[in-house]
C-alpha cells in the first residue's frame, strides 16, 4: 500500500477528516474510543503526519541530519568536520544522530527526522541494514538523502564513497608482488556494498596473480567484537604470510592477534589496510595502507546533499573519492 493519508484513515473508519486529525492530536472533544480506533489504524498502516510539508509552507529550516552507525570509528571526526565546515559555509545547521549500528534504531531515527523538519539527510548505514526500504518515507516527503561511506548502491539515492574494488585490488596486489602466497583478506558485514566491492577487488587480485581462491583466503566478520576469536579459529590450521584488512577497525582488532603469535612484520607477514591514515601511524610497526580522506568524503556528501535540496530534479549520482597507497614499511 502507498503512503497512507489522513483522508484514507477517515474513509476506513467512516468519520470526518477533522475527527481523525483531532483524534491524533488528542483533542479533548474526541472520545477515547474514537482516539483508540484512529491510532490503531494509523499505527497499523505506518501513518506519519506530514509535518515536513506543513512546516515548509511557512519557511525553510536550513537544517540537515547526519546519521552514523557509531561515533567511535577512526575516520568519523574528519568525516564530521568535512560535513560541518561545508554546511556552515552554506548557512546550514547540522544535527547528528547515532544508530548504535542497529537497523531498527536507524529506521526510528529516520522517522524522527521528519518531526525535526530537516531539509536533507546524510546517512552511513548500519551493518545489518539489508535494504533501503526504510528511506522511502523521506523520499515520499521529498526530503533528499545522500548515502556516504557505508552505502548500498541504488538508483534512488546518491552515494559518496571510495572505489572499494580498486582500493582492495591495489592493496592485495602490493602484498602479492612481494612474493606472498597465503594471503588472508579480512572483511566486514557482507550486506554492505563496500564489503562486496572490496571483496571483489581482493579476489580479482588473487586471480590476476595466479593465487587460487579458497575458503581459507578470506574471513567475513559480522560483529567487530568477535574479530579476535574468529581470527584465532581461522589461523589455527593455516599459516598466512600476508594480511589485507578492509577497515581501520578490523586492522586494530586483528593485527595484535598476529603479533602475539610472534610474527615479525614485514619479515614474516605483509600487512596492508584501507584506512584514513589515523590508526596505521599509531600502530607499531606502522601499517602501509590505502589512504582515503574522511574529510573529503564528508565535504563531497554535504555538497551533493545541498545541491539536491536546492534542485529536487537533480539526477542521482554516485561519487567515488580518490585513494592512494601509503607505504610505511609493512608490506
Image (cartoon, rainbow, N blue to C red):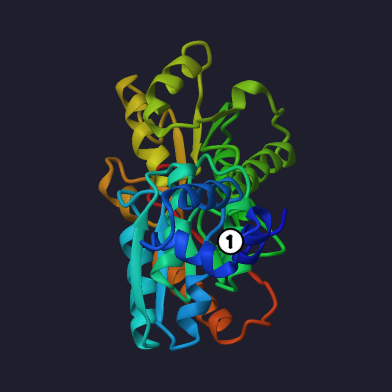
Say if 288 sits above or below 229 in the image. below
Q: Which picture quadrant has residue 47?
A: bottom right
At 56% across and 65% down in the image, what residue appears?
138
Q: Nearer the viewer, residue 243 or 25?
A: 25
Quarter of the image where one finds residue 224: top left
Residue 315 in percent (x, y) is at 70, 77
Residue drawn at point x = 58 percent, y = 68 percent = 17
Q: Is residue 328 above or below residue 23?
A: above
Crowding around mark 1 (Cα neighbors within 10 Å: few <14, some 14 to 19, many 20+) is some
Which residue is labeled 1 in the image? 137
| Image x and y of residue 290, in percent | 48, 54
Task: Judge by depth and name the residue closer to the eye, 65 or 142.
Answer: 142
Query: In this rendering, does residue 293 appear at all?
Result: no
Residue occupying the far top of the picture: 237
Residue 247, horizontal then vertical, whole percent: 45, 45
- Quadrant in the rendering for residue 205: top right
Which residue is more in the foreground, 194 or 27?
A: 27
Amino acid at each position: 500500500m502507498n503512503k497512507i493519508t489522513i483522508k484514507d484513515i477517515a474513509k476506513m473508519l467512516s468519520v470526518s477528516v477533522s475527527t481523525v486529525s483531532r483524534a491524533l492530536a488528542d483533542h479533548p472533544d474526541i472520545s477515547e474510543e474514537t482516539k483508540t480506533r484512529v491510532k490503531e489504524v494509523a499505527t497499523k498502516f505506518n501513518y506519519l503526519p506530514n509535518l515536513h510539508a506543513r512546516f515548509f509552507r511557512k519557511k525553510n529550516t536550513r537544517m540537515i541530519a547526519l546519521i552514523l552507525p557509531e561515533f567511535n570509528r577512526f575516520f568519523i571526526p574528519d568525516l564530521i568536520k568535512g560535513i560541518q565546515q561545508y554546511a556552515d559555509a552554506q548557512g546550514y545547521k547540522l544535527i547528528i544522530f547515532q544508530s548504535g549500528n542497529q537497523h531498527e534504531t536507524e529506521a526510528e531515527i529516520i522517522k524522527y527526522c521528519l518531526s525535526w523538519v530537516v531539509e536533507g539527510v546524510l546517512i552511513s548505514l548500519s551493518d545489518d541494514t539489508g535494504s533501503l526500504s526504510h528511506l522511502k518515507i523521506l523520499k515520499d516527503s521529498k526530503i533528499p538523502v545522500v548515502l556516504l561511506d557505508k552505502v548500498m548502491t541504488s538508483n534512488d539515492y546518491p552515494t559518496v564513497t571510495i572505489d572499494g574494488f580498486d582500493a582492495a585490488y591495489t592493496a592485495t596486489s602490493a602484498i602479492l608482488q612481494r612474493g606472498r602466497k597465503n594471503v588472508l583478506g579480512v572483511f566486514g558485514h557482507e550486506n554492505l556494498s563496500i564489503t562486496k566491492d572490496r571483496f571483489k577487488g581482493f579476489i580479482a587480485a588473487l586471480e590476476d596473480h595466479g593465487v587460487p581462491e579458497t575458503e581459507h583466503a578470506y574471513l567475513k566478520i559480522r560483529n567487530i567484537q568477535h574479530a579476535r576469536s574468529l581470527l584465532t579459529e581461522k589461523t589455527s590450521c593455516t599459516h598466512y604470510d600476508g594480511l589485507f584488512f578492509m577497515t581501520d577497525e578490523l586492522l586494530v582488532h586483528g593485527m595484535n592477534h598476529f603479533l602475539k603469535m610472534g610474527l615479525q612484520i614485514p619479515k614474516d607477514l605483509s600487512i596492508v589496510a584501507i584506512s584514513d591514515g589515523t590508526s596505521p601511524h599509531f600502530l607499531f610497526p606502522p601499517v602501509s595502507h590505502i589512504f582515503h580522506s574522511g574529510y573529503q568524503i564528508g565535504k563531497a556528501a554535504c555538497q551533493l546533499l545541498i545541491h539536491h535540496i536546492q534542485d529536487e530534479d537533480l539526477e542521482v549520482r554516485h561519487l567515488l573519492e580518490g585513494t592512494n597507497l601509503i607505504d610505511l614499511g609493512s608490506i
